[in-house]
Image (spheres, rainbow, N blue to C red):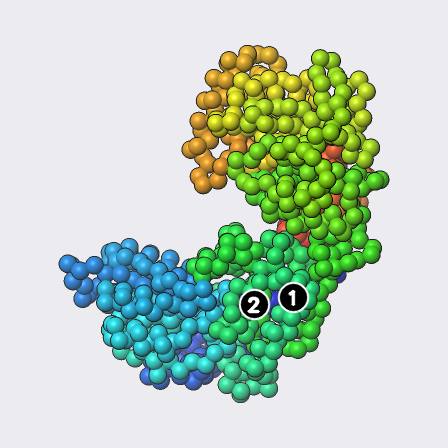
Amino acid sequence: MSLQQSLSQIYLDANATTPVLPQAADAALAAMKTGFGNPSSSHVTGLRAKQIMTQTRERAQRILGSGEGEVIFTSGATEGIQTGIISALSAAKQNMDPNKKYCLLYGATEHKAVPESLKHWNAILGIHAEIVAIPVDNQGTLDTKFIAQHLSNALMICTMAVNNETGVYQDLTALEQVIRANNPHVYWMVDCVQALGKTGLNLADTTIDYAPFSGHKLYAPKGIGFVYIRKNAPFTPFIAGGGQEGGLRSGTENLPGMAALNEIFAIMLDESDFKFTPIALLHEFRLQMRQSLEKAFGKVIFNHEFENSVPTTLNFAIEGFSSKEIMDLFDAAGIRVSSGSACSSKVTRSFVLDAMGIPAWQSEAAIRMSFGPAMTQEEVNRACQRIEQSAMALGHSCLMSQHHIDDKAPLAGLIQFKVGGSCTWLYVDADDKSAIVIDPLAQVSERINTLIECQQLNLVGVIDTHGHADHESSRNVIADKYLAAQSSDHLGWPDNAETFELGDDKFAYIPVGKKWLVQIKTPGHTSDSISMALCEPVTSQLDVQYLFCGDTILMGSLGRTNFDCSNTADMFSSLRLIDNVVSRDALLCPSHDYNNEFTSSIDAEIARNNLLQQTLTGVINKSQFVTQKDLLDQHIVDESGSEIICGAFVGECQQQRMNEYDSDTLANALNGTDKSIKLIDIREPHEYALQHDQSFDENVPLTRFVQFINENKHDKNAEIVLLCRSGSRSHVAGQALIRLGFENVGHLKGGYALC
Ligand code: PLP
């Protein structure tokens, strides 16, 4: 089976790496196939190889304006950075005064390779200088006053020419004046990786001692780079051995890499038929992309000024969307961009934007689009068209207010919004569009507003399960807009709700379309905690689909009961009341989901939560519960860090075994005797609409996953295979299904990306 990637790729992540230009690839291939000699060999094959190396170096020297300085080939910039740092620190160590305190200065927005290497060699060489980050202002410009103050004690200063996340460049002439006025002899390294091909350089006219470069950021392959060393700057080889590169960097040279670089240099020097796009036109390309983003998404906030950044980078945030959502959207549209720093894709915030004092949400939502000087007008046009298509897909899913689309996808059932470990729930009746919102988080209120308007929902309630201690509810914001005439208590429960009796208990309820939302008072976590059961109209018992149980039962834990307004004994009674009136397989929809489990049931919780099991089976009484629960809650403080955690995990969080397919094994399974495999694409509807494989004809986005579980909970033997972009969402969703007793769950490992 081959999953269809119906869209061609638009690659906008050049600051992470670039494709190899065909002429550079051809040169590398020729250097491997025919010109494969070792430049150290004295026969003809060796001499020809040496000629390529010499020409590449000579072109590099011209491009850098290196004068009498050295240009040494390396494996890339990280090696060049080591070379500069070891050389500077080894020399500085010779002249250190044991009674003086020293520092090593680096720009706060520097690529991690710089501070990490400084730390490393500072320790290895036993220098033990203080490593100090130079602050930047909100435009990303280094604080020259700070530099001036700290230079007298500095052994080395590391700055960068162009930042990889924002494209912000530094005024190297102004920096040089400050540096040399305050410390004429300090060693100065400038990371020039992102400057090559985007700004002019004339290194020998400066007092920069070391300047590392990397080939793969400018259309050469990975594994080739070079470093400039100023004439008379101290030098210690980073790699010793056979004496290549005049003894400055040993190891047989990477000739294919150099041959490719040679072609790139020829283009830069205008000695090739191929031309890079002039800088002025690159500026126009960036403006065109900016306009396209603003037209498509409306509220786009740029995280840097265009005036002091190279024209090939745009770093922005789209209000109301996380960077992960935009990455997923763009990837589905075939547009490759990066979030935060491409070098540390697991980190959700950008330290570069944080250092610039950019608001936290912008740093969390940051998207970087970057291209290189080989970009063409035609590619820019295609990129802009694709950006606009992506935004239309969001509009179709009612996630953006500025798109009024007639054929929007209908919305019905339960939707789960997650922000970090917290959840908001929206339920919509399929027929009359009655809707309720439970535990609205501030971060999703705008999105809920857009959905209400776009889908013309009839909001009947916006209700908190309790007064939240860890975050602010946006209940009032939504209620003031849509339910101004409704009078309710402080949680939003309507004052005029009807009531009914069940056994000795009396319950209030509000109708939501054909269903009832029944209030069950469940104090414990807080004195005002309620649970709400969405069920069929009640006759003799509650037939519950979903129980919105707030922080009473959390997945893998019970809500903490050590707040001032908590009561542990009350929680015991609340748990038993829930168990009396709600069936054990009804789905629990708590206000937190710390471990990406989506939902649970009393049955599933009893299986891993000893305390809950003992409580509900009568093994322990109220006072024993209080003792055990109080002990459990003591752990919460230790684990919580800065976030208030509403329940301590007590169960096992084991990874469950699930079937892992690649496209071939899935094709075999589909061709086998059992053809009843449910193939489900679990990306969001806008991603699915932009591109999907035809055989995955069911789309169950994670936001609707709890509803899918509810609809399928009586068919747990069915074979299910899940698919997403990279295999991570499908893995998480598969784990959740298995935990709830689904027996035949698999996913496509690596997702669309690897198929
Ligand atoms: N410095 C900067 C500014 C970079 O952008 C990068 C790569 O992302 C590096 C250094 C490291 O370069 P290399 O991948 O060649 O080791």
The three-letter amino acid code for the residue at tag 1 is: Leu
Mark 2 residue CB less than 8 A from any atom of ligand 1: no
Q: Which circle marks residue 314 in the picture?
A: 2
In terms of depth relative to the viewer, which is nearer, 690 or 325?
325
How many discs mark residues in the rendered view? Answer: 2
First along the sequence among labels 2 and 1: 1
Q: Are marks 2 and 1 in contact (CB under 8 Å)?
A: yes
Cα distance, mark 2 to mark 1?
10 Å
Residue under label 1, please give it: 293
Name the residue: 48% across, 73% down.
308
Q: Classify residue 136 by image quadrant.
A: bottom left
Q: Secondary structure at mark 2?
A: strand
- In the displayed structure, 551 sits above or below 350; it is above
- Amino acid type indicated by mark 2: Leu
Asked whether 78 or 284 is in front, the reply is 284
Q: Is residue 639 above or below residue 339?
A: above
Q: Residue at x 37, y 62 (%)?
A: 135
**Picture quadrant of residue 477:** top right
Q: Is residue 492 left or right of residue 516?
A: left
Position in image of residue 142 (x %, y %): 38, 67
Q: Position of residue 632 (x, y in %)?
A: 48, 24
**Where in the figure is residue 322, as x and y percent of width and height?**
60, 53
Towards the viewer: 456 or 342: 456
- Work out whether residue 389 can be spotted: yes
Q: Quadrant of the C terminus?
A: bottom right
| Viewer can see residue 658 | no
Q: Secondary structure at mark 1?
A: helix
Could you say where residue 721 lies in the image, as x and y percent from the top left?
Answer: 72, 42
Q: Label 1 crowding class (10 Å Cα cut-off): few <14, some 14-19, many 20+?
A: many
